[in-house]
Image: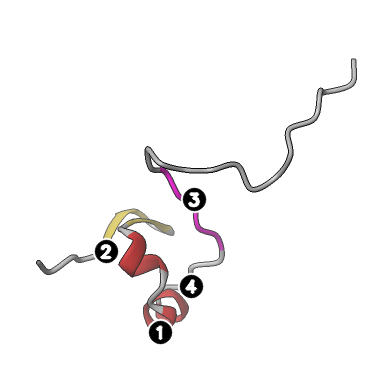
Amino acid sequence: LLFVTSQIVKGLYLGNIHDSEDRESLLRNGVTHILSVHSSARPVLELKPFPR
């Protein structure tokens, strides 16, 4: 299968895990942040109660 990153609006792209690992494409498109959304995510940071 061939996956292609899609520009949704200027500066916002939608892609898959392979796109997020393509350093040349990220640099070429000026990508500075990546948001990963998937069903098998594991917490990276310990959740702490928010002080009130």
Whether pointer 3 and pointer 2 mark residues with C-beta atoms closer than 8 Å, the reply is no
Marking on residue 49: none
Task: Kindly identify which numbered label has been placed on residue 30.
Answer: 4
Q: Where is residue 35 in the image (x, y as percent from the top left)?
A: 49, 50
Q: Which mark is residue 35?
A: 3
Amino acid bearing label 2: Thr
Three-letter code for the amino acid on which mark 1 is drawn:
Glu
Relative placement, left or right, of 5 versus 32 is left
Q: Residue furthest left?
A: 1
**Which SS does the magenta portion mostly show?**
loop
N-terminal of the two: label 4 or label 2?
Answer: 2
> To which residue does mark 2 refer?
5
**In the rendered picture of this protein, how many numbered marks are placed on residues?**
4
Residue on which disc 1 sits: 24
The residue carrying pointer 4 sits among few (fewer than 14), some (14 to 19) or many (20 or more) residues within 10 Å by Cα, namely few
Give whichever of discs 1 and 4 has the lower sequence position: 1
Q: Residues within 10 Å of mark 1 (few under 14, many from 20)?
A: few
Label 1 SS: helix
Q: Are marks 4 and 2 in contact (CB under 8 Å)?
A: no
Q: Where residue 28 sits: x, y (%)? A: 41, 81
Outermost residue toward the top?
52
Asked if the stretch drawn in magenta spans residue 38, the answer is no
